[in-house]
Amino acid sequence: MSSRARMWTVLGLAALFVFGAAWWIKASEDAEITAASQAREARRREREERQRERWERVRDESDALVPALLEGIHLGMSIDQARRARPAMEPNVVQRDAEEPDLVHFEERFENGARAVYVFEQDPDRLQRIQVLSMLPNGEAIAPHLMAMNEQYGTPTGVWDCPQTGGVPTRRFTWRHGQVTVVDIFLVYGGRVSQTLYIAPTEVIGRSLVRSRCHPVPPDQITTFPAADPAQLQAETP
């Protein structure tokens, strides 16, 4: 073989080597990209499955905690499901939470003057929290009301003073039941008592306690409720 032929042979082999190395690198990169994409998808499916299982537990727990007044309602249900269960509920386009603008509010009014508020997430569509707002005749009605709550839900797991509930102070009693927590919120002002039953996933209640700057009530202050100046009253944000 002539020297020129050997040179072309060497160059050809070198080119094949370079092409083969480039192909191998490209194939390795593609395999890494595919593996990373598959891992991300697997993690996404795992998160969705954990969320689905968690919301199933939330739904099951809330079934036993929602008062008889709201028969057919449980956390996690869609807007359509809730409207079939409570046909009297109507959209509340006025009530909005500035810190959670993506939530959708519905409400239902009752003959006794109470009002239920149903708050839904939009993506996915599911009932995130339930609130029942009513009035107690006076401060003396708080103790009998709490006795009834204790009979229904047991001993409170927490008692909190929350100085920043929409700009006014409130007292809150919490009953934690695993994935779901029940809260009784009292706003005392001018001799009147506004009472709100609040049922939501435990982490939602936790965020609410933090947002309202709640702190545990010392045992020697349990019987003394904070009172708001009527001039302070604004829209409540439990």
Image (tube, rainbow, N blue to C red):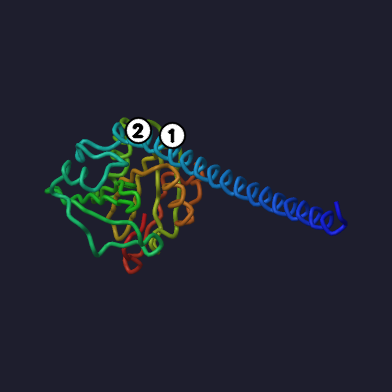
Q: Which mark is residue 61?
A: 2
Residue type marked 2: Glu
Is residue 204 placed above or below 233 in the rendered structure? above
Is residue 16 placed above or below 151 in the rendered structure? below
Residue at horizontal 20 percent and vertical 37 percent from the top:
72
Give residue 199's position: percent from left, percent from top: 34, 43
Give residue 81's position: percent from left, percent from top: 21, 43
Residue at horizontal 14 percent and vertical 48 percent from the top:
112
Is residue 226 toward the left or the right of residue 3 in the image? left
Where is mark 1, residue-wise?
A: 178
State how far apart marks 1 and 2 are (Cα). Answer: 8 Å
Secondary element at image label 1: loop
Give residue 140's position: percent from left, percent from top: 29, 46
How would you rate the neighbour count of disc 2 (Cα within 10 Å): few for under 14, some for 14-19, many for 20 or more?
some
Is residue 189 toward the left or the right of residue 8 in the image? left
Residue at horizontal 58 percent and vertical 43 percent from the top:
35
Secondary element at image label 2: helix
* Sooner in the amino-acid sequence: mark 1 or mark 2: 2
Is residue 134 toward the left or the right of residue 183 in the image? left
Is residue 146 placed above or below 131 in the rendered structure? above
For the residues bearing labels 1 and 2, Cβ distance under 8 angstroms:
yes
Give residue 226's position: percent from left, percent from top: 41, 55
